[in-house]
């Protein structure tokens, strides 16, 4: 699915250089469920942003679906992103002014899909994440778990082949957290590649493989033993 | 997609009620001002353009250049010019027509009604192709005295419009009324024309032949129009006209070699479409057929409209970018979901345009509400005919789009620039120092514009006030002015009977009353002095000096409380003051004259006393010698805008046109009725023309008064809009600083300190704006004041600038302070707990 070769990301501000990622090499196969762990400030979120094409590497190669996208323009990246990658955030990032249904539909709006087809897809995905009864509610009227389910629905409604989740359970209690993890697992079993940043070792156990980062380096990669 | 944009936009408008209200109100007020000014400008610039072939019609204006004097300018021309030019410049001219207007009275049974009658050449309707309701341009002017009237006149005198063949009894020029046959009825003219026609009569050739004042090459009494042939430019025609005047016209005959007619007398062509706005500079003080517009006023108000709109747009830009962080997450999420920057830009631009169109609807309602007052202030009949006038509708839609794009483009570009990676990761502020700096710059701009407008308003007000209340040099209280030019033979009997009314103190005659200008100028030669006869005065004396000439009867100066600074006023007991006619070949006549102070210098006198007893010669009713018996101070007979001319006053009973009636009553209306009764008894065939002098004097400053009113209204609007924006910006900034304010309070800051802190933040831009606005406004106003010969001291600008600056600063403090105080009073713990 994707390969990162000698990838670095350096932030520069006011003559202070911060190396967020240093010569990182990572391969992720199609259909894999990968967890990324590490202490705060180790570069997890930066890595996820680069994989999600929201940020660009300072150096190194990024090969996505056998294409080197390192030199791609913002517009080209946006095209790949919208067709292949879904995002889930710790803080949900739903748009406050739109209803649940409209928030999910937003992901299809930039895809040139006719309105009735959009409606069908949205209805289907709402059923799937169990939020259909809340379709006309505003995000502020939902619990955190429900909001995150809407976010998941939004991430997958466009049939994205890869989902990037940045601490998806960070703002949730354990019961809701588990619910979301099970939903991700189910998606993975249907063939969606999942890359997840997490602090929770128990949630990392859902993944096939865990990558540990420390100070911008990949320290260890552990493969979960089939239980 | 569009639905989604609209939804987001609509819910944002609702959610941020206060900001939306500020934006909509500000934009609506801005658009309202702009629409009101557009209506006015459109009417003023549309004069006469609706007339068929208007682009081919020109009018000939005249100017006499007298070295050492103000030139005599007029939009009229000499009666003989039209036919001669038309027959000479056949390649350029298709048709020519003259026009002259008189007062007339229409007599119906016992009623006498004052009307205006226009005498024209038969080709009139070939040049001005006005639409006929009955009759036609081919059939209407078959013979002299054929009468064409407007629908309004037809209804007034016949009760219907189908009146071809009926007769109207009209009395004009001579004492005997004539029966005139109506041969055509034309549609009423719209306001947007300089022509001012009610009754149009075809008689001009015969009138001109019999009237030496009209059949002249130099005496300028008629309005002359030419319709040029297609494809001829006004420059070509003007060149040909000037060539003819200088080389082939009767004017050029007998001139010394090397001298040209055009050195002293200009014949200038002006396009019909320019007349309303540009004829003022050629019109001198005698005016035109209808009140003239003012191109500089149109320009000034166009600039004001633009400024006010810009101020409103800046409100929108500032509030939109200040609140950008609130929408940053939405932008980021849309981008994550695949929106391109372009799509986000279009979304926000669309929102801006939508908001502007909501404001536009509010503005249109406001315009309808304000229009009656506006019309009253402007003395006009503007209307907002959106549906019957598609160009207006299009213009307003275009204004909406331009404002929407203008206000929306910067926030849209700014918001769409956000990079999703940064925003979604953290709730970091998206604000950069550069943006808030740019916002401050925009606030400075807004207040610079507002402060400049207010300074201009105050200066215009001060000058107008000054002009109206300046000491004109005579007592204008409790006076009425009665026109007697068409009842000259009855004036003594009128005077006697009027003096019988106990309220009337005096009745004095003159050629003009104050405010009535003339261009009656003659050359006066100072005759050899009895005492000192040095060469230089002699030489100057021989040339003759052009003086403005006013005629009066005994008692005029006394009635106006004008006292001589040397010598005496006219007095019957000397028996030698009056001008009497002198036949050619006889000895020069002897009469007396009074000078004003300005005339002293012109004639070469060093003091008033020196002039007394000297004699000037002139050709007035034959060769005359005038002994200077008195000198009076300079008095402002006309608007102080035009200054004082060197003037000579004499007693010429043939030239008395008006009576000045001094009265003393508590009931002027009743006295007026009594005077009207006296008039009707003595002059039954003529309508009365009686005016109060104070209203005549006030009317001189009508233009300035309208300008002052409009300037005041629009500068108040500009301040209001700018303050709305400042309030919104302050409210928002305060909201963002609640945490800081909380910490400061915990550290021991008092409410006063906090309010001071917040107020200071917004005082800086207003202070800077003052420093920018003062020189700009002062420069503009010093230029404007130069239009007036008598003007307020430009040093007044210093206190005005300081006062306006302080006022605006106080207004800004009040705007910011109310909000700051409520925030500063809040319990700091609430602010610190929220996160």
Image (cartoon, coloured by chain):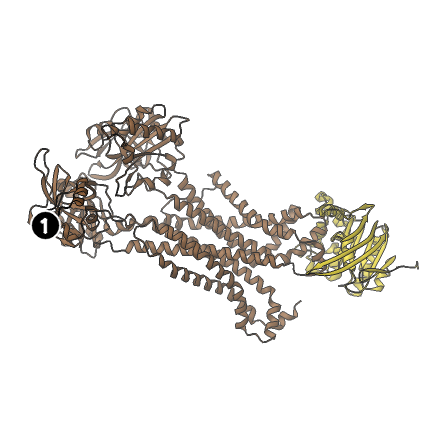
Chain colours: A yellow, B brown
Could you say whether the residue bearing mark 1 is in a helix, strand or loop? loop
Query: Looking at the picture, how far across and down is residue B310, in whole percent?
Result: 51, 51
On screen, B754 above or below A26?
below
Q: Residue furthest front?
A: B535
- Which residue occupies the foreground of this view, B802 or A176? B802
Q: Give the quadrant of the C terminus of chain B.
A: bottom right
Q: Which residue is mark 1?
A: B571
| Residue B89, placed above or below residue B586 | above
Q: Residue at x 12, y 44 (%)?
A: B528
Residue in the foreground of this view, choosing between A166 and A118: A166
Q: Nearer the viewer, residue B540 or A110?
A: B540
Q: Quadrant of residue B177?
A: top left
User: Horizontally, is A17 left or right of B259 in the view?
Assistant: right
A180 left or right, relative to B483: right
**Few, some or many C-alpha atoms within 10 Å of disc 1 (few <14, some 14-19, many ≥20)?**
some
Could you tell me residue B247's position as x and y percent? 29, 27
In the picture, measured across the screen, residue B390 lies left or right of residue B522, that is right
In the image, residue B600 above or below residue B123: below
| Residue at the spot 36% in from the left edge and 54% down from the top edge | B460
Asked whether the viewer can see residue B86, the reply is: yes
Residue B39 placed where, x, y %? 43, 44
Residue B443 placement (x, y as % from top left): 52, 57
């Amino acid at each position: 699915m994707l390969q990162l070769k000698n990838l670095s990301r350096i932030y520069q501000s006011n003559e202070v250089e911060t190396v967020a990622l240093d010569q990182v090499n990572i391969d992720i196969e199609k259909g894999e469920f990968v967890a990324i762990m590490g202490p705060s400030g180790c570069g997890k979120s930066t890595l996820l942003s680069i994989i999600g094409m929201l940020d660009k590497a300072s150096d190194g190669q990024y090969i996505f679906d056998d294409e080197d996208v390192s030199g791609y323009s913002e517009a080209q990246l946006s095209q790949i992103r919208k067709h292949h990658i879904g995002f889930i955030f710790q803080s949900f990032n739903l748009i406050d002014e739109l209803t649940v249904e409209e928030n999910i539909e937003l992901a299809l709006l930039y895809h040139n899909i006719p309105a009735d087809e959009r409606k069908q897809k949205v209805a289907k995905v709402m059923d799937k994440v169990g939020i259909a009864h809340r379709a006309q509610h505003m995000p502020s009227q939902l619990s955190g778990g429900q909001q995150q389910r809407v976010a998941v629905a939004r991430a997958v409604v466009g049939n994205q082949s890869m989902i990037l989740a940045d601490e998806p359970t960070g703002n949730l209690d354990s019961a809701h957290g588990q619910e979301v993890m099970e939903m991700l697992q189910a998606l993975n079993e249907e063939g969606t590649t999942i890359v997840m940043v997490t602090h929770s070792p128990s949630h990392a156990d859902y993944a096939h493989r865990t990558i540990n980062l420390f100070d911008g380096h990949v320290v260890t990669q552990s493969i979960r033993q089939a239980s | 997609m569009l639905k989604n944009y609209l939804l987001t936009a609509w819910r944002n408008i609702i959610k941020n009620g206060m900001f939306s209200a500020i934006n909509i109100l500000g934009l609506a007020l801005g658009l309202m001002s702009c629409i009101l000014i557009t209506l006015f400008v459109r009417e003023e610039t549309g004069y006469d353009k609706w007339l068929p072939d208007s682009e081919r019609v020109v009018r000939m204006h005249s100017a006499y250049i007298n070295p050492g004097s103000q030139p005599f300018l007029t939009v009229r021309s000499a009666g003989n010019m039209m036919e001669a030019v038309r027959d000479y410049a056949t390649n350029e001219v298709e048709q020519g027509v003259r026009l002259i207007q008189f007062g007339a009275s229409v007599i119906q049974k016992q009623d006498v009604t004052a009307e205006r009658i226009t005498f024209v050449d038969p080709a009139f309707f070939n040049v001005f192709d006005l639409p006929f309701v009955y009759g036609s341009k081919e059939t209407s002017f078959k013979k002299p005295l054929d009468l064409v009237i407007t629908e309004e006149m037809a209804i007034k005198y016949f009760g219907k419009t189908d009146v071809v063949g009926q007769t109207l009894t009209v009395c004009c020029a001579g004492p005997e009324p004539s029966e005139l046959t109506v041969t055509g009825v034309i549609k009423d003219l719209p306001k947007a024309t300089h022509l001012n026609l009610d009754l149009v009569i075809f008689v001009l050739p015969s009138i001109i032949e019999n009237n030496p004042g009209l059949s002249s090459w130099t005496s300028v009494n008629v309005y002359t129009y030419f319709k040029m042939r297609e494809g001829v430019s006004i420059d070509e025609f003007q060149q040909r006209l000037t060539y003819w005047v200088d080389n082939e016209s009767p004017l050029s005959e007998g001139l010394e070699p090397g001298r040209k007619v055009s050195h002293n007398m200009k014949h200038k062509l002006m396009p019909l479409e320019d007349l309303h706005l540009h004829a003022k500079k050629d019109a001198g003080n005698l005016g035109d057929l209808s009140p003239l517009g003012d191109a500089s006023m149109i320009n000034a108000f166009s600039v004001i409209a633009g400024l006010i709109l810009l101020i409103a747009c800046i409100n929108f830009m500032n509030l939109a970018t200040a609140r950008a962080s609130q929408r940053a997450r939405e932008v980021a999420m849309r981008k994550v979901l695949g929106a391109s920057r372009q799509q986000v830009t279009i979304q926000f631009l669309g929102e801006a345009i939508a908001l502007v169109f909501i404001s536009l609807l509010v503005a249109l309602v406001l315009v309808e509400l304000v229009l009656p007052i506006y019309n009253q202030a402007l003395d006009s009949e503007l209307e907002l005919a959106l549906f019957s006038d598609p160009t207006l509708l299009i213009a307003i839609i275009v204004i909406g789009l331009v404002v929407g794009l203008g206000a929306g483009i910067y926030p849209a570009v700014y918001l769409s620039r956000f990079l999703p990676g940064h925003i979604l990761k953290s709730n970091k502020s998206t604000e950069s120092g550069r943006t808030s700096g740019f916002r401050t710059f925009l606030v400075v701009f807004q207040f610079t514009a507002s402060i400049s407008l207010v300074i201009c308003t105050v200066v215009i007000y001060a000058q107008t006030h000054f002009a109206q209340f300046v000491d004109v040099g005579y007592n204008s209280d409790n006076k009425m002015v009665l026109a007697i030019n068409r009842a000259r033979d009855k004036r003594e009997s009128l005077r006697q009977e009027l003096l019988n009314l106990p309220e009337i103190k005096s009745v004095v005659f003159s050629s003009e009353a104050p405010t009535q200008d003339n261009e009656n100028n003659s050359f006066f030669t100072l005759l050899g002095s009895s005492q000192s006869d040095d060469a230089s005065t002699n030489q100057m004396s021989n040339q003759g000096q052009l003086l403005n000439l006013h005629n009066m009867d005994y008692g005029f100066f006394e009635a106006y409380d004008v006292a001589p600074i040397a010598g005496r006023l006219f007095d019957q007991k000397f028996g030698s003051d009056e001008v009497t006619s002198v036949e050619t070949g006889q000895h020069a006549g002897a009469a007396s004259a009074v000078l004003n102070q300005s005339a002293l210098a012109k004639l070469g006198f060093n003091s008033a006393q020196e002039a007394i007893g000297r004699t000037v010669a002139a050709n007035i009713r034959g060769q005359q010698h005038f002994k200077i018996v008195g000198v009076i101070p300079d008095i402002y007979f006309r608007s102080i805008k035009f200054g004082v001319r060197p003037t000579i006053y004499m007693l010429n009973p043939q030239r008395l046109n008006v009576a000045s009636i001094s009265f003393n009553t508590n009931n002027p209306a009743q006295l007026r009725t009594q005077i009207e009764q006296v008039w009707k008894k003595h002059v039954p065939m003529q309508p009365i023309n009686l005016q109060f002098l104070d209203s005549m004097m006030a009317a001189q400053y009508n233009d300035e008064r309208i300008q002052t009113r409009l300037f005041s209204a629009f500068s108040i609007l500009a301040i209001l809009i700018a303050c709305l924006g400042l309030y919104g910006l302050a409210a928002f900034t305060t909201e963002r600083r609640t945490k800081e304010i909380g910490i400061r309070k915990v550290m021991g800051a008092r409410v006063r300190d906090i309010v001071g802190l917040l107020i200071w933040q917004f005082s800086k831009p207003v202070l800077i704006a003052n420093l920018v606005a003062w020189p700009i406004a002062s420069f503009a106003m010093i230029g404007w004041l130069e239009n007036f010969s008598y003007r307020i001291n430009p040093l007044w600008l210093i206190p005005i600038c300081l006062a306006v600056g302080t006022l605006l600063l106080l207004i800004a403090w009040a705007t910011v302070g109310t909000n700051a105080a409520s925030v500063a009073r809040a319990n700091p713990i609430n602010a610190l707990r929220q996160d």
